[in-house]
Image (spheres, rainbow, N blue to C red):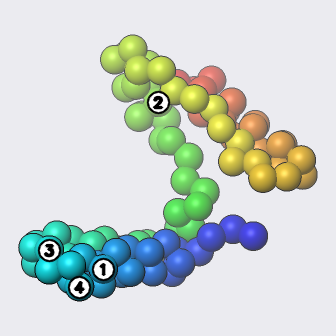
Amino acid sequence: MPVTNDQIAGVFLDMAALLELKGDIVFKIRAYQRAARVIEQYPEALERLDLKDVHAMRARDLGVNLVIDTDSHTAAFLGMIRFGVAVARRG
């Protein structure tokens, strides 16, 4: 079952709450809270964001090694490798 943006944002809010209980600096707490708001409002599902072509090409130009990962948790999702391969071919 894919994770939702709200669930990801919830982790950031939980972290902010823990930092607040710990007495951490307010700037750090607010950063986690702002990140949660941005994630909640993001129009796409963060669980499936592939590297954009321009970034793949820039990584290649800089000699950065990238890994192709299917994020497969079951055999049924092994076909997702095609998305990673497509990005690699464009880069």
- Quarter of the picture holding the N terminus: bottom right
Using residue 25 as the reference point, say whether residue 91 is left or right of it: right
Q: Earlier in the sequence, mark 2 or mark 4?
A: 4
Mark 2 or mark 3, which is nearer to you?
A: 3
Q: Residue at position x 30%, y 84% from top?
A: 17
Q: Secondary structure at mark 1?
A: helix
User: In percent of the image, x 75 and y 38: which residue is there?
Assistant: 81
Rendered image: mark on residue 18: 1
In the depicted structure, whether residue 71 falls above or below residue 32: above
Q: Callout 4: helix, strand or loop?
A: helix
Residue at (38, 80) in percent of width and height: 14
Question: How far apart, in angstroms, are the residues tagged by discs 2 and 4?
Answer: 40 Å
Quote the CA–CA distance across marks 3 and 1. 9 Å
Q: Earlier in the sequence, mark 3 or mark 1?
A: 1
Local secondary structure at mark 2: helix
Marks 1 and 2, how far apart at CA? 36 Å
Q: Position of residue 55 (x, y in %)?
A: 41, 34
**Residue 36 at x, y percent in the picture:** 35, 76
The amino acid beneath tag 1 is Leu
Horizontal and vertical percent position of residue 38: 34, 74
Q: Earlier in the sequence, mark 1 or mark 2?
A: 1
Tag in front: 1 or 2:
1
Residue farthest front in this picture: 22
Give residue 50's mark. Answer: none
Disc 2 residue type? Ala
Residue at which label 4 appears = 21
Query: Mark 2 highlights which residue?
Result: 56
* Number of other residues with Cα within 10 Å of mark 4, as a class: few under 14, some 14 to 19, many 20 or more: few
Name the residue nearer the viewer: 56 or 3. 3
**Tag 4 near tag 1, CB within 8 Å:** yes
Q: Which residue is mark 3?
A: 24
Which tag is nearer the camera, tag 2 or tag 4?
Answer: 4
